[in-house]
Image (cartoon, grey):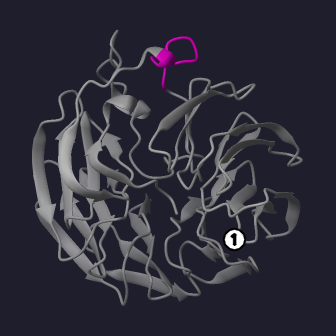
Amino acid sequence: MKQIRMLVLILCACFVSVAWGQQPAGKGRADWTEFHRTNMMRWNPYEHVLNVNNVGKLRRRWSYRIGHWIDSSPAVANGVVYVGSDDHSVRALKASTGAKLWSHTTSGAVESSPAVANGVVYVGSDDYNVYALNAKTGKKLWNYTTGGRVESSPTVVNGVAYVGSYDGNVYALDANTGVLLWSYGGFWGTSSPAVANGVVYTDADALDANSGALLWAFPDETYSSPAVANGVVYIGGSDNNVYALDASTGTELWIYYTESYTNSSPAVANGVVYIGGDNGNVYALNASTGAPLWISPIGRWVDSSPAVASGVVYVGSEDGNVYAFGLKKGRE
């Protein structure tokens, strides 16, 4: 799973608000516009307000009541939080106050995490569709119908939206029109594609971004979403391992055994891979060797995917909490 379930409330203030200040206007690069971020690493190098010295002072600024499960991870762009819910809706909330700006209703639960690009919100729904919505109004621009639930989160690169479906396919859609460019079978269902250097990395395969042709295949079932950094693909496997694969060939570079499922999707920053395990641990692994740098126990399984910014790794747990750890030593 990409996300941790949260009931009734989205505690967005944990991510967008601090008592002593906000991101200054014009710092759009600090936005988190899609599940991976555009660098495909789940690392925000532009965050400068929250850090290891003040993150412990975070307090809730606002909450917004939805009343249903929330499997979708929020995207933040231009002062707006976009998030899906199991009540069949996508919402846009003002990041500073939590005020609802708009909502769009689909025919199924929205477990996919939105991606925001060029004034458009792309998101999947359990009604088998991928939607493109106007980011300011929520008006539907187009939808594309697949053969199964779309819990995968879209990745938008160079005018193309890449997304997976429970029908077993990865789709490349024209981001402006929704027209199908290509599709490829062999997809497990929930992973969010990562795109780097003209290649689409899914839960098990590497595909040519222009044609969908298979470049190499990963022989393991996984629900983790890959992260790509410095020519290496990092991904968690359902066989209790974390893998580092050569991005060009798929050759295994190293493997680390976690003793539990690693449905969490890794984040990569400054030569370290951060990932959660269903055994309740958060792991920091050397990106070059896979050697453990630190392991921090939480106690309940961690399907949530870490996010890294300004010396801090953030992750949610099934114990109902969001945690912040220092990157160097894993101190909570």
Residue 331 quadrant: top right
Residue 147 seen from this side: yes
Q: Please say whether residue 54 is one of the residues in the magenta stretch.
A: yes
Of 282 and 99, the residue lying toward us: 282
Residue drawn at (54%, 18%) of the image: 51
Q: Position of residue 272 (x, y in %)?
A: 75, 39
Residue 13 quadrant: top left
Q: Position of residue 253 (x, y in %)?
A: 88, 60
Residue type at tag 1: Ser
Residue drawn at (29%, 72%) of the image: 125
Residue drawn at (10%, 61%) of the image: 139
The span picked out in magenta is 47-56
Q: What residue sits right under mark 1 in the picture?
A: 238
Of 84 and 208, the residue lying toward us: 84
On-image quarter of the C terminus: top right
- Number of numbered discs present? 1
Residue 138 seen from this side: no
State left or right for residue 44 relative to residue 297.
left
Magenta segment main secondary structure: loop
State left or right for residue 39 relative to residue 327.
left
Q: Position of residue 58 (x, y in %)?
A: 41, 20
Of 28 and 66, the residue lying toward us: 66
State left or right for residue 288 relative to residue 121.
right
Q: Please say whether residue 8 is one of the residues in the magenta stretch.
A: no
State left or right for residue 66 relative to residue 221.
left
Residue drawn at (72%, 59%) of the image: 233
